[in-house]
Each structure stands twice: as structure tokens, then as C-alpha cells.
Amino acid sequence: MNTFEAVRIVAAREIRVKLRDKAFLFSTVFFLLFAVAATVAPALLSGGASTVAVVGTAPAALGAAGLDVRTVADEAAARAQVRDGDVDAALLSDGTVIALTDAPNDLVNALSTRPAVELLDPSAVDETLAVMVPMFFGLIFFSVSLMFGLQIAQSVTEEKQTRVVEILVASVPVRVLLAGKVLAGTVLAFGQIALIAVVALAGMRIAGGDSGLLTLLAPAIGWFLPFFLIGFVMLAAMWAAVGALVNRQEDLSGASMPVQILVLLPFFAVTMFSGDPAVLKVLSYVPFSAPTAMPARLFQGDAAGWEPVLSLVLLAATTVAVLVAGARVYEGSLLRSNGRTSMAAAWRDREARRLADLETESA
């Protein structure tokens, strides 16, 4: 059995175990329900288009505004329909608007004459979107990497605590076991995000939502995917190494605090400084904040075409370095069962094992 086949088997095992985990299934269902509620509920709660009774010829602006227009014979009929609740409002022949309790803003806005507007910078991003989009990217990367990364660490610690890892290591190399866990976590994270995205898009279509924002976000989303993939692999390797340092689930929280900070600080930094182009530019080249900062800059139009390529190369190089270091810590601490292992001890133990293996091969 070659290395690739061994990694595939380990990853398939991890995925099967996680798909039977109730916590994972409940979280997926929760996110799906949240996506449906965020896209479909507003349209349902809005009650649809307002119904308007019109005496005489209906202005073309009412139809353009999406109002349901009903022509009535006279003013008395219009007033009767409003009072009986058959229509939301009525428009009389002299231009008077009639409603029962509240002014019908959609009808009034449709009848209002809007002044001509000339935009000197039509490509400028709306201020609200300029804040919300970086928060959106940051929240996705923060929540998914934290949730799935913690699950990877818990899986490693559980196998150490139950001594199942000794059986696994007897069957496959330690680095194959690490690669399988990272691969499984990446597949599950992307699978959950893809499922939520499909449900959200379907909800927007059902609700009749405008696709203009999605078109505006498309380039940033396109770059966010490779940034997310490489960034998640980097963090997953760190989570697996942290999980191997402890022997009990109770000790995992303290040991994983440095990784949690590396996930948490970039989220707050990108969110807080989303309106500062200079700070956001620096964050877009820092590996731990680049997966959210660079897509945000692309959305705001502040990044040149070569910048996301350079940032992605820096992130990939950092990920390779973290994978090598994480694998060494993982190998040096996975089979140690005498309490919590320090990173320095795990690093030294892995070097001692490597030298021992070389001596055995030379003998």
C-alpha cells in the first residue's frame, strides 16, 4: 500500500466517524436553517407586494414598483375596499392616497418624483458593504477553522487517551495519519460550506432576491476559496500538533490557546480596520489574516492584479513550513503518554527518533 492510498484510507475513516457525530450533524443543520432563514424569511415576512385600488387609469410607476394594481369604478368603491381590508391602499383620480391606519410608503414612494442623480465615482463601494463584506469573510474563516480545527485536535487527543493511536501507528506511518486527518478536516469543512452556499443561493432564488450583490462579490469570492483552502490546511496542521501534545480532553483548552489566538486576532483585526486601506494592505500579506484581508481588499477595489498572487504564494510557503514543523511536533508527542508534552520536548524527541532510525538503517 503506497502513501497516497494510506492517506486516503485514514481520511475516509475520519470522515465516516465525523458523519456519525451528532454534534457535527446538528451544527450543519443549524447553519442550513440559518441560511434559509436569512434568505427566505425576509421575503415571507414582508407579505409580498402591496395591493392598491386605483380609480381611473393607473400610473405606470405603480407597476414598475411591483405593486398589485386593481382598477375600481369610483371613489366609494375604493374607500370600501380599503375599509374592508381587500386592498392595502387606494389612489383616487385627484391623486389622493387613502389607507386605513398607516401611510403606504411603497405607494407614496412609487408616486414620488425622484431627482436626476449623477455619480462621479459609480464604482465606489457602499460604505455599509465595505464594513459587512470583510466581516462576512472573517466570520466564515474564523468560525469554520475554529470549529473544524478544534475537532481535529479533539480527535487526536481522544485517540491518545483511549490508546487507539498505538494500533493506528502500528498500521500506518505517523505522518500518514497526520495527513489523513488534515485532508479529512479540509474535505468536511469545504463540504459544509458548499452545502450552506447552495441552500443560501436556492433561498435567494425562491425569495426572488437580486443577484447584483452576488455579481459584485464574485471576484472576491473566487479568490477567497484558494486562500481559505491553503489557510485552513495551515491551521489544521497546527491543531493536530496541539492535540498530540496532551493526553486528556480537559487539557486541550489550555494547550490550544496559542492557536485560538492566531485564529481570533486576525478576525478582529480585519473587522476593525476594514475601513483603513493601509492597515488592511499590511494584513493582506500576513499569512494568518491574508485569507480574509486580501478578498476584502479585492472587493473594495484597493488591490492590484498581482497582489493576491503574491499574497497566496506567501501563504502557501508559510503553510509548507507549518506543515513540516507541525508534523515534527506531532510525531514527537503522539506516542508520549506521561502527561502534557511541551513543544520543545516533542521537537527533541522527534530528532532523537530520527537519529535512532538512521542508526538502525546503517547497522
Image (cartoon, rainbow, N blue to C red):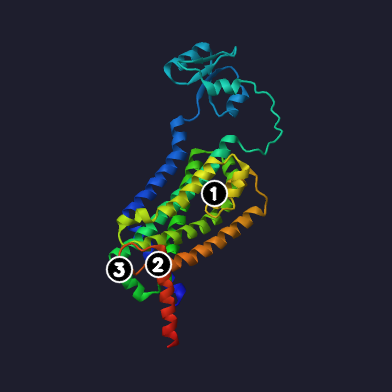
Disc number placed over residue 346 in the picture, else none: 2
Q: Is residue 339 left or right of residue 351?
A: left
Q: Position of residue 60 (x, y in %)?
A: 62, 25
Q: For marks 2 and 3, give the one nearer the viewer.
A: 2
Which amino acid type is marked by label 2?
Ala
Q: Nearer the viewer, mark 1 or mark 2?
A: 2
Please name the residue that numbered disc 1 is placed on.
292
Q: Are marks 3 and 1 in contact (CB under 8 Å)?
A: no
The x and y percentages for residue 317 are 57, 62
Query: Would residue 55 be seen by someone viewing this image from the given angle?
Result: yes
**Where, quadrant-wise, is the C terminus in this rendering?**
bottom left
**Residue 9 visible somewhere in the drawing:** no
Mark 1: secondary structure:
helix
Q: Amino acid at mark 3?
A: Val
User: Which circle's residue, 1 or 2, is located before the other in the chain?
Assistant: 1
The residue located at (47%, 57%) in the rendering is 235
Give the amino acid at mark 1. Thr
